[in-house]
Amino acid sequence: MKSTGKPVIVLVEDNPADVFLFEYALRAHEVGYQLTVFPDGQRAMDFVEQAHRGDVPRPDLFVLDLNLPIYSGLEVLRKIRESPRLQSCKAIILTTSNAPQDRDQATALGISLYLQKPTNLDAFAELGRRLKQALAGENGHSRSGPAG
């Protein structure tokens, strides 16, 4: 991952359709970005370790699904927060879960936003606006429901 001057976003998502829609949302709101996608928690954990050591650039934003193969999004988030180099990185949870315990655990780990995955294309496009705001540093701590 080479720095391009654009915000570096790490998306940890195992559903290729959601990855496509995530990129659509960014493009719909003209968010310039450099995106790296990891399809499971293990690859994300490996990346976090590399970033912790300084072997790869520090991301501007992590976007994590909670329900991932191998390690959950919460486990990845916990590892991010344990790294002195990464602990101040913005992190957004983007998941189907609306379980209060998931929200509470993610909030305790210092997320910027907790968003339920949108259920239609228009709502996914609106997600791009929320991501753009998060990258700009606008209103960080929200516990909102579906984007849109």
Image (tube, rainbow, N blue to C red):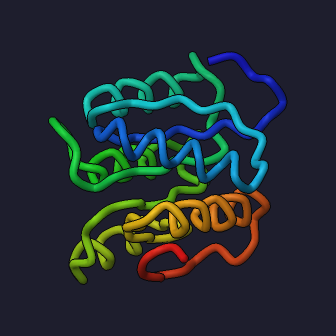
Q: Look at the picture and state if 43 lies above or below 139.
A: above
The quadrant in which the N terminus is found is top right
For residue 17, side relative to residue 133 (left or right) = left
Q: Look at the picture and state if 136 lies above or below 108.
A: above
Q: Look at the picture and state if 138 lies above or below 61.
A: below
Q: Look at the picture and state if 102 lies above or below 67.
A: below
Residue 103: percent from the left, percent from the top?
Answer: 32, 76
Total labels: the figure holds 0
Residue 88: percent from the left, percent from the top?
Answer: 61, 54
Farthest front residue in view: 121
For residue 74, side relative to residue 19 (left or right) = left
Farthest left residue in view: 70
Task: Identify the residue at horizontal 22%, vertical 44% (top origin).
Answer: 68
Task: Identify the residue at horizontal 37%, vertical 67% (top origin).
Answer: 119
Residue 80: percent from the left, percent from the top?
Answer: 44, 45
The quadrant in which the C terminus is found is bottom right
Task: Identify the residue at horizontal 65%, vertical 49% (top origin).
Answer: 26
Task: Pick the residue in front: 49 or 96.
Answer: 96
Residue 4: percent from the left, percent from the top?
Answer: 80, 24
Task: Pick the residue in front: 6 or 58.
Answer: 6
For residue 72, side relative to residue 112 (left or right) = left
Task: Identify the residue at horizontal 34%, vertical 52% (top origin).
Answer: 65
